[in-house]
Amino acid sequence: MGKGRVEAFTDGVVAIIITIMVLELKVPHGEDLAALAPLWPIFFSYVLSFINVGIYWNNLHNMFHTVQRVDGRVLWANLNLLFWLSLMPVTTAFMGENHFAPVPVAVYGVDLALCAVAYNILVIKLRHLHGAETTFARAVGQDLKGKISLALYLAGIGLTFVSQWIGVAIYVLVAVIWFAPDKRFERLIERNN
């Protein structure tokens, strides 16, 4: 089956996720800059999550641009990823509202790790559907960046109980690693055109 509907559905779900996250931001009570200070954990959590959701959306866009079709397994794998991404507003609010307490930071990390696992499952299903010699498979390669990211998330979850700031720093590090759009897909698309 064609890939257009899964791309449109994914775009819609990502837009809803971001909308729900921004609705968690509350208007400060007061008219001076001091009124903003209590909101910094919530705002920082929102920015980090917005970037993470944006990274997934960007990579899904590039990835689906290189595939020709999808099947039922790919649809379910994509829904699996969207499920874990859809929990991002809850885990974001949990972390921000509780001022980066260890358990909320760890829960946020678990959500990030499960998003990474789900993304890897989607890649595996797409590779299985399209074969090892396709543009998609060549672009993905060994996906070292994805494997390192998952390992960092898992380390961040555990280290959160040593210091929640270590966990937060690791989650930020992974976002920084992925912040620049993944050029693997773009290079092959350009080369094939």
Image (cartoon, rainbow, N blue to C red):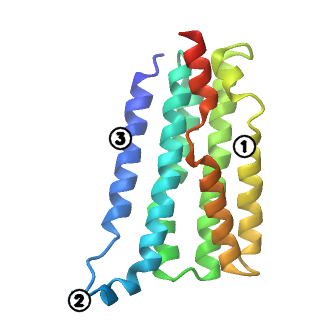
Q: Nearer the viewer, residue 100 or 178?
A: 178
Q: What residue type is labelled 3?
A: Gly
Mark closer to the chain start, 1 or 2: 2
Q: What element carries label 1?
A: helix
Q: Is residue 25 left or right of residue 54?
A: left
Q: Nearer the viewer, mark 2 or mark 3?
A: 2
Q: How crowded is mark 1: few (under 14 residues within 10 Å), some or many (20 or more)?
A: some
- Residue 186, relative to residue 118: is it above or below? above
Q: How many marks?
A: 3
Q: Observer-nearest residue: 75 or 22? A: 22
Q: In this view, does 34 lie above or below 140?
A: below
Which residue is pictured at 30% across the width and 76% down the height?
Answer: 26
In front here: 43 or 101?
43
**Residue 27 placement: quadrant:** bottom left
Q: What residue is drawn where x is 69% and y is 29%?
A: 140
Counting from the top left corner in percent of width and height, residue 98 is at 51, 83
Cα distance between the residues tagged 1 and 2: 44 Å
Work out how far the residue at label 2 is from the one at label 3, CA to CA, in angstroms: 35 Å
Rate crowding at label 2 as few (under 14), some (14 to 19) or many (20 or more) other CA atoms within 10 Å. few
Q: Mark 2 points at which residue?
A: 30
Q: Name the residue under label 1.
A: 145
